[in-house]
Amino acid sequence: MHRNFGLTRFYPYVRNFVGEIYGECYWNEYNMLWYFSGFMGYVVLAHYIRHHLQWTFKKSIGIGTMLYIIGYCVTALIWYNRIPTATTLQELELSWRFCTPNVILMSFGAFIVIQSIFSKYRKGNRIVNEISILSYGIYLMHIFVLEVVHSQFKDIFPTQWTIILVGTVTFVICCIITKIISFLPFSKYIIG
């Protein structure tokens, strides 16, 4: 399965040049390849990292940082080159689609760096564990909060600061709301 996941990462780029294949729509580009691609590959990657990756702290930090930077540079390069030619939002979003190779490099790199730091120093593990427990609820509500927060910040700051502030404020608000909901009876049916 991991080989199929790796190969299908390039499908969004191929689809960009060939056009829609098999009648899919832009938000579900994998259609019949769904079980070998899409977000399921992240589960396989997480299992691999947790059970089979035995790197030293220094190696994890070095390789993780390098992979993150490479993924970021590829993402930025594709995005900046598409700005003048993209005619739709979907064409412009191609470089930061969650299941593209460059975003997977960034995710993998960031994850092993963060995991290594928290494994070595053990500080902040309580906070990370708490956020992990709340993460599904945060995910479920973030788009609603994001819209409200973005409407408050969009005309005040330059774009790069707006992105950082909106992301941070949205995350904090969603954490607080999800934590409050977690105290309710049967909250596991609401926030996971």
Image (cartoon, helix red, strand yellow):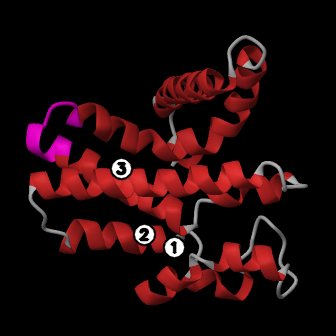
Pointer 3: residues within 10 angstroms few (<14), some, or many (20+)? some
Helix, strand or loop at label 3? It is helix
Q: Which residue is mark 3?
A: 110
Q: Are marks 1 and 2 in contact (CB under 8 Å)?
A: yes
Q: Is residue 183 left or right of residue 26?
A: left
Q: Is residue 95 left or right of residue 49?
A: right
Q: Is residue 143 magenta?
A: no
Using the rendered image of the protein, determine whether residue 145 is visible from the camera's viewpoint: yes
Task: Give the residue type that dot 3 points to.
Answer: Ala
At 44% across and 88% down in the image, what residue appears? 3
Comparing 182 with 118, the one in front is: 118
User: Splitting the image into 4 quarters, where does residue 108 fall?
Assistant: bottom left
At 20% across and 72% down in the image, what residue appears? 51
**Residue 109 spot, x, y in % from top left:** 34, 55
Helix, strand or loop at label 1? It is helix
**Residue 172 spot, x, y in % from top left:** 50, 24
Q: Which residues are magenta?
A: 117-125
Q: Which residue is mark 2?
A: 43
**Residue 21 spot, x, y in % from top left:** 82, 85
At 78% across and 15% down in the image, what residue appears? 155
**Residue 114 spot, x, y in % from top left:** 27, 45
Q: Which residue is mark 1?
A: 40
